[in-house]
Image (spheres, rainbow, N blue to C red):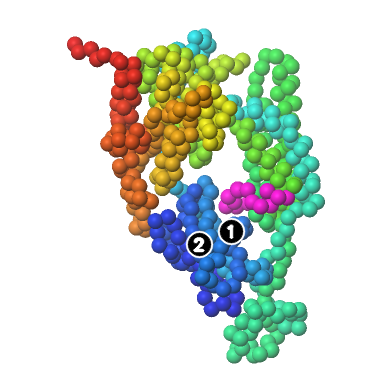
Amino acid sequence: MEQLNSGINSIDIYIKAENSDWIKLEEVCESNGRFFREAASYKWKYITEKRVIFKIEEESLSAYLSNNERYGEFTLPFHTGNIIFQLLDADNPKQQLYLGKSFVYSDERKLSQKDFEKMIEDINEIANVCFGYTGLKYNFSIKSRSQDNYEPLWSYIEEHFSDLQLLFRSIENAPKKQLKPQEQFIKIHKVRKVNNQTNNWIDKYEDKYGKEPRYVRTSKATENYNTFENRIIKFQLIKLKALLNVFARWFTNKKSDNEQEKLSYSNKAKLADKYGDLVSYWLKNTFLFEVTSEHIVPRITQVFRKDPLYRKWWLWFDELYKNEKYNVNTEGREIPLTKTYDLYEIWTFMKILKVFEQNGLINDTSSLYIVKREGIFFNLARNKDCVVELNNGWKLTYQKTFRWDTTPYKSFTQKMIPDIVLDTGEKMIVLDAKYRVQGNLGNALSELHKYRDGIVEKRSNKRIVREAYILAPRTNSQRKYNDGSNEINEEQEGINFKEIFSEVYRKEYKMGAFEFMPFGNLYEFENWLDDFIRNELHFEEVIL
């Protein structure tokens, strides 16, 4: 942590995490405590009458003034790594008042690698069992990441790479720049402008160097291209270069007995190499050469929102990764958080489907699979509804969408996409998978209220959702770290975490939460679902 001399006697920047007291930012940065965590929200305040700009990773944060204290909030993204804090004088943005560095730690609520592999194993097992209800006659397999995702990704790159070339040329002609103050000693007769920092230095070292020293310490603003947006551009191009190398190897190794297909694969491999060489040239021989990309946390900024060229650049890569469908892969690499979240939702759906299969209630599961020339593949994806037909007209739907114009049910407030919906024709049960519910239980419960109140029958406008529950990998209610800090308290925002997961709460309010862990005991949920099926279908137990 470095406090820069700016003529202000004290710099008091305070940070506050949820369920914690205000603490000086300087103390946080100098300690080894796990204070900053990915995806967590924080409040900050700065005690001064001056107008200031508070920045995190070169992005300015908005604030409001109250009793000579400036307040604001920020939320960290789903990434770990170093984080830089800056405080600038709003009247003279070149003057840096404060500079600090800390570390964003991984969220301990993430599922482990073993959990991840267990979910994949369960999905494969249940998917193969459910395949018998499709009526299809091909061999079933869950395709690996490489070949399932390459086609849509390559098609997008091949079709739109020329657009990326034009965008880069335009940005290269007028890239964003920044002025950064740099401390240096210069001869006193070369000083063009004396600022507060120079005066403070002379006052401090007057006894040693005299009132008119030959050299003085001052700051000089230098222009460079190392803006946050340019760092993101370089980061994205590095990832694109690696992807193009994979495509080149993939097309080179692809085999076919058809000569025309062989020629096509060869041409695509050469094209991937060509694109890769061009990206390498951009990285080494343009303004990006002096731009750093270490510890970058990509997120959209005002420049990406408002500058036409930078906005198109962001949208190009945003569309690229929309073409990357969900995949199952554990080959030794770290699992991205968003992918784990998607996998958890799919896993909960398949575990529920297994209960219906064990009760002999599955009728048709063909929507779970997609037929391609190479065979039949698993076809569950986020934001894409999938309906499994059950007996007696029941339906179990993954990612069902409700809008004002959907039938036979609609949402009269806003678009809603609950993770799992069980529709019996007379009532509806909503199940929402919440992989990271701890610390956000209040919002999760609010969503259940939204589903119960906002989803109605289109003709009668009668509410159709009778029960709504959260499915979450509930872990220990309180976890302590080596530095003594706490993960979460049993009670937060007036909500008792343990009570929400209790059977008493669920029976009383027809909402609440079930524990859903890959290696955990799902007895409570399975018992509840068995009872629900028995009561709705009037099953009679046979005593032998």
Q: Secondary structure at mark 2?
A: strand
Mark 2 Cα shell of 10 Å, populated few (<14), some (14-19), many (≥20): many
Mark 1 Cα shell of 10 Å, populated few (<14), some (14-19), many (≥20): few
Tell which of 464 and 391 is nearer to you.
464
Q: Which residue is mark 1?
A: 61
Q: Quadrant of residue 214?
A: bottom right
| Residue 294 is inside the magenta segment | yes
Magenta segment, prevailing SS (helix, strand or loop):
loop
Over which residues does the magenta segment extend? 293-307
Q: Residue at x 63, y 88 (%)?
A: 209
Confirm whether residue 72 shows in the render.
Answer: yes
Q: Relative to residue 466, is residue 231 depicted above or below?
A: below
Q: Do residues under tags 1 and 2 come within 8 Å of each other at their CB atoms?
A: yes
Confirm whether residue 348 shows in the render.
Answer: no
For residue 20, side relative to residue 521 (left or right): right
For residue 236, side relative to residue 362 (left or right): right
Q: Which residue is mark 2?
A: 44
Tell which of 520 and 91 is nearer to you.
91
Q: Given the image, on which type of amino acid does mark 1 rest? A: Leu
In x, y percent, where is residue 390? 43, 16
